[in-house]
Amino acid sequence: MKFFIDTASLKEIQEAQDLGVLDGVTTNPSLMAKEGIAGKNNVMRHYKAICEIVDGDVSAEVISTTFEEMIAEGEELAEIDEQIVVKVPMIKDGIKAIKYFSERGIKTNCTLVFSAGQALLAAKAGATYVSPFVGRLDDISTDGMNLIEDIRLIYDNYGFETQILAASVRHPMHILQCAKIGADVMTGPLSAIMALLNHPLTDSGLAKFLADYAKVNAK
């Protein structure tokens, strides 16, 4: 399973990259705003800076909601770097835009997906990635992992090449559940990725090893 980090923070992206497990980055307007990135030119430069840190795909979201505007904005985003994936919302014009981009070799990420039917439409249109939001479903007392399972089954039934990008991942259990189900990608905060490192027996075991070494090597 690929690990993407869901942030616009260059510091966090660099930390994940240095860890050696990062495969890509997802962003959205909210994450850009959180980092204080405002103005078209600044946003474009920031996307380029992200591409210079990470080796894999970088999702850059359009803010337009009509077909024509999404096409114009998406084509401009795609010109920033070959790593850019145009992130398009799951709406009628978004599906039309995904079809347009896919026919022209521009990678896409269909975002704000909350049903298997939406994921099926995105795959039919040729989306590179589909982003079901597992955490937001959990927030309304719906098991987000059931959606990942349904999409996996449908895609496997028909050989769709669209990758399932589990989004709105909140914690390490989400990551492990997605891995068990067979999500192609997960995107989440750095904290969720780093939490996979932790286990109390690892900590106590290492402390014991170091203590035993110190006993026999004390000067």
Image: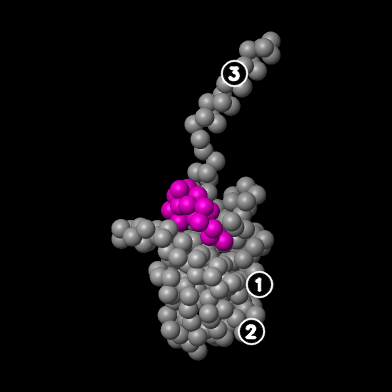
Sequence-earlier tag: 3 or 1: 1
Closest to the observer, 87 or 45: 87
Check if mark 3's residue and mark 1's residue have beta carbons within 8 Å: no
The image position of residue 85, as x and y in percent, is 58, 72
Q: Label 3 neighbourhood size at 10 Å, few (<14), some (14-19), many (20+)?
A: few
In the image, residue 188 sits, relative to residue 200, either above or below, namely below
> Three-letter amino acid code at disc 2?
Arg
For the residues labelled 2 and 1, the Cα–Cα distance comes to 15 Å
Extreme residue in the top direction: 219
Is residue 140 shown left or right of residue 177? left
Q: Is residue 192 left or right of residue 208?
A: left
**Judging from the image, what secondary structure is the residue with disc 2 in?**
loop
Q: Which mark is residue 104?
A: 2
Residue located 46% across and 61% down the image: 149
Tell me the residue at 67%/12% (across/down): 216
Query: What distance separates the C-alpha of mark 3 from that of mark 1?
Result: 50 Å
The mark nearer the N terminus, 2 or 1, is: 1
Task: Name the residue tied to disc 3.
Answer: 211
Among the two numbered marks 3 and 2 on one chain, the one whose residue lies closer to the N terminus: 2
Q: What numbered label is drawn on residue 81? A: 1
Disc 3 is placed on an element classified as helix
Foreground tag (2 vs 1): 2
- Residue at 66% in and 72% down: 81
Q: Tag 3: residue type?
A: Ala
Would you say the residues marked 3 and 2 are in contact, meaning their CB atoms lie under 8 Å apart? no
For the N terminus, the image quarter is: bottom right
Residue that extends furthest to the front in the rendered view of this protein: 157
Q: Nearer the viewer, residue 146 or 22?
A: 146
Q: Residues within 10 Å of mark 2 (few under 14, many from 20)?
A: few
Check disc 1 and give the amino acid type.
Asp
Q: Which residues are magenta?
A: 169-185
